[in-house]
Image (cartoon, rainbow, N blue to C red):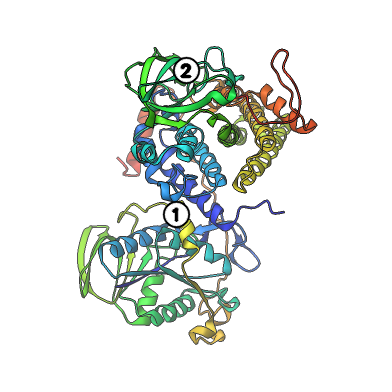
Amino acid sequence: MDFEFDEETATFANAVRRFAKDRLAPGALERAHDPSYPWDVAQEIAAQGLLGLTVPVEKGGQGARLLDAVVAVQEVAMSCPKSADIVQAGNFGAIRTFAEFATPDLLDGYLPDLLDGKALMGIGMTEPDAGSAVTELKTSAKEDGGGFVLNGTKVFSTNSADATVFLVYVRYGPGTDGIGSVVVERGTRGLTVGPPSQFMSGEVWCPLYFDGCRIPASNVVLGPGGFRKQMSGFNVERIGNAARALALGRHAFELAKAHAIERTQFGRPLCEFQGIQWKFADMALQLDGAQLLLYRAAAGADRGLPSAYDTSIAKLACNEAGFSVANESLQVMGALGFTRDTLVEYCLRRTRGWMIAGGSLEILRNRIAESVFDRRFDQRAGGQSGQVVGVTSQ
Amino acid sequence: MKIIVCVKHVPSGRSSVDPASKTLDRSGPAEMNRADRYAVEEALRIKESTSGSEVVAVSIGPAGAQETLRTALALGADRAILVTDPQVAGSDLVGTARILARALGRENPDLVLFGQQSGDGVGGVLWAAIADVLRLPFASQAAALTVTDQMVRVTRQTEVGDEDIEVPLPALVSVGDSINEPRYTSLKGVMGAKKKPLENVTLADLGIDTADAGQGGARTVVLAIGSPPSRAGGVRVEDEAEAARAIVEFLAERQLV
């Protein structure tokens, strides 16, 4: 067992770190407080080859491992937390599902601009009545005249304010097997991007209203029964979410550490107080423990086994560690940490959101418990529990 | 055109000198010398604009210096050579120049590029010493360079202004940090670097007698090392309505305003 990166990964991490320090650290605070999507930074990150890392070379990606994408998120986040959103959007979640399952024509039409940072894919999954119970989604796709007509509403969609194209989860028919996904371009007739709302994290989201929105059949990414195919995609996305959460915790930790060395009270630096030392020891314990779980999940996924248990426990640990460490870092920095003059409070707000998004801590615990007991616990009222059949909740 | 770029593996972050051996502690993490990144970038730009060119990265140091050579390969160099031998440790400037000159001479390069100076030794003259051994012309502090068939035109940055000179090839040039903006390593580059040749050569391979290398072959002796003197306390000006005047007088006395 080896806990070190191999030489290539270490070299790549150093290169991303250097790039991020030089190009992304300047302006990181202003970027964090600007809710708009930083297209200029996205194109610079794309030029550096940090988008589509795990997309196969023949599709225009880098053909790298998931671990490399995790490293990229971490290194970018250490210099500019907001810019890590771009790396996330370009490597995990919607783009990955799209790159894996879309037809060659769809890939040709959208992937080059997505990988160049000139386009952005949002995801339309959560609905007013389908959050953690994602398989209860209602947005319908009815076949009509060689195409499909969409009706329904999506909420809380990441990047919905800026996305140029959406991967929308739709229902072709009843049951889990009736769920699939389609591509809908922003501006398509029948799609209304609603008024913006803001999360506590500062991110802006817009409801997506589909009202007789007609799309060609060629926009189908996954037809009926496709939902089960992308279960492993959820696990991969959770790794990206976990990587960002932990990295922002570590970002806050480093700010607090520098503060504890520089700041003098009662005649000595903060780091010389035993109470402060214990805080840092506890934070280091949380960060390192979660980091190992994250690497295990990423390495497992790279071996073709994006295990629900490994990814759930990694996301749980990273979400909790990221938030807890950001919170404690803010405490160490006192009133300064509570201002918007440093990124600590930003890290706190962002890490709080990831305890909900991409699989809430409670759903993750349910998933872990299913693996512990090797049986499925149906959370539906009157539901049947039995053998593990796969992940059907978000 | 064959371009050699010399790169050094230097400690990253804060480095310290071992008081017993009076040599730099190289046990910690290390990376490519910052100034050498500009030389690598310039070599790659010449290669990209001159068909049939080859860039060879060369370093001298312990086995760990392979890491810096791999970085050069990942950036785009075609192959790399590391002069590594236990007897090299402790070589002084002249000894290092003699060894590197032999390694470079074997390759018959058209152009050899260096960073202006290393971040650890901060000598800034190794390229001149190598040029002397090889009896080749050199130009330092290049802010721009253009290669033609038989010449390299160099804009040198000097304290009194820019100086344009032409040097016949083969030649050595050390480049300054205003010459370009170095690229960053890409993942594709890192993966591609694995397949590129990296040759380790010893003093015996270069035909150098071990007695002429290392501390035994050094012509200089480090007598003592020490930290720079701590800064004086300075002058504190309390603001009692006269602070501005006091500061101006302080600066004026030193002819700073």
- Foreground: A266 or B48? B48
Q: CA distance from mark 2 to mark 1?
A: 42 Å
Depth check: give the residue in front, A262 or A131: A131
Task: Check if mark 2's residue and mark 1's residue have beta carbons within 8 Å.
Answer: no
Residue A150's spot in the image, x, y percent?
42, 18
Q: Residues within 10 Å of mark 2 (few under 14, many from 20)?
A: many
Asked if badges 2 and 1 are on one and the same chain, I answer no
Q: Which mark, residue A140? A: 2
Task: Please state which of the two labelled residues, at mark 2 or mark 1, is closer to the viewer.
Answer: 2
Tell me which chain the residue with mark 1 is part of. B
Q: Secondary structure at mark 1?
A: helix
**Residue A254 seen anywhere in this rendered image of the structure:** no
Residue A107: give x, y in percent of width and height.
39, 39
Q: Residue A351: which quarter of the image?
A: top right
- Residue at the far front: name it: A145
Position of the C terminus of chain A by quadrant = top right
Q: In which quadrant of the rendered view does residue A307 lie?
A: top right
Q: What label does residue B188 carry, if any?
A: 1
Q: Of the residues shown, which amino acid type is indicated by label 1?
A: Lys
- Secondary structure at badge 2 equals strand
Q: Nearer the viewer, residue A42 or B238?
A: A42
